[in-house]
Amino acid sequence: MSVVEEAETSSVTVSLVVERPLDEVWEALMKPHGAEALLGEGGQLGQKGEHWAASDGTYGVTRSFHPKEQIRFSWHASEGAPRTLVDLHIRPDGDRTELEIVHEHLPREADAEELERHWESALERIESAAS
């Protein structure tokens, strides 16, 4: 994990290497259970500009969608919460796949340790979805 603090905001970075080829990980992520692994129950990935919402109250908009490379989406922790940005990078690593999540523009009052655990769990759920 990495926490970077700037003047007004901070970011959290987590990563995981999945023992599956990139194509399999991407395919799993594009299915409903894979999208929910990342976004939360009820969350569905869409193309750039599409809104998503999870049953836990988190919601946002897909900002960038590059198949088998990167998905960037805004992320609000709850209704009225500040907009933050989440970047999922997907990279081949031989027969494995590296997943990295960077959650940026976190307000100073954000609990970075809690968000680290949240995104580590999301990566583990994506790994399970690809298995």
Image (tube, rainbow, N blue to C red):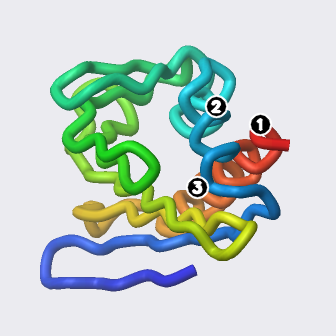
Task: Please give the residue where the numbered disc 1 appears in the rendered image.
Answer: 129
Rounded to the nearest angstrom, the CA distance separating label 3 from label 2 is 14 Å
Circle 3 residues within 10 Å: few <14, some 14–19, many ≥20? many
Mark nearest the camera among 3 and 2 is 2
* Residue 60 locus on image (x, y percent): 29, 30
Q: Are marks 1 and 2 in contact (CB under 8 Å)?
A: yes
Q: Earlier in the sequence, mark 1 or mark 2?
A: 2
Expressed as whole percent of the image width and height from the top left, the position of residue 91 reads 51, 67
Identified by mark 3, the residue type is Trp
Which image quadrant is residue 92 in?
bottom right
Q: Is residue 12 above or below residue 41?
A: below
x and y percent of residue 72 in the render?
30, 48
Identify the residue under disc 3. 119
Instruction: For marks 3 and 1, give the CA distance.
Output: 15 Å
Q: Amino acid at mark 2?
A: Gly
Between discs 3 and 1, the one toward the N terminus:
3
The quadrant of the picture occupied by the C terminus is top right
Q: What residue is drawn where x is 61% and y is 18%?
A: 32
Q: Give the camera-side residue of 23 and 86.
A: 23
In the rendered structure, the answer to whether residue 54 lies left or right of residue 97 reads: left
Q: How many marks?
A: 3
Q: Is residue 127 left or right of residue 115?
A: right
Residue 34 marker? 2
Q: In which quarter of the view is residue 26 placed?
A: top right
Q: Residue at x 56, y 71 (%)?
A: 14
Pair 3/1: label in front: 1
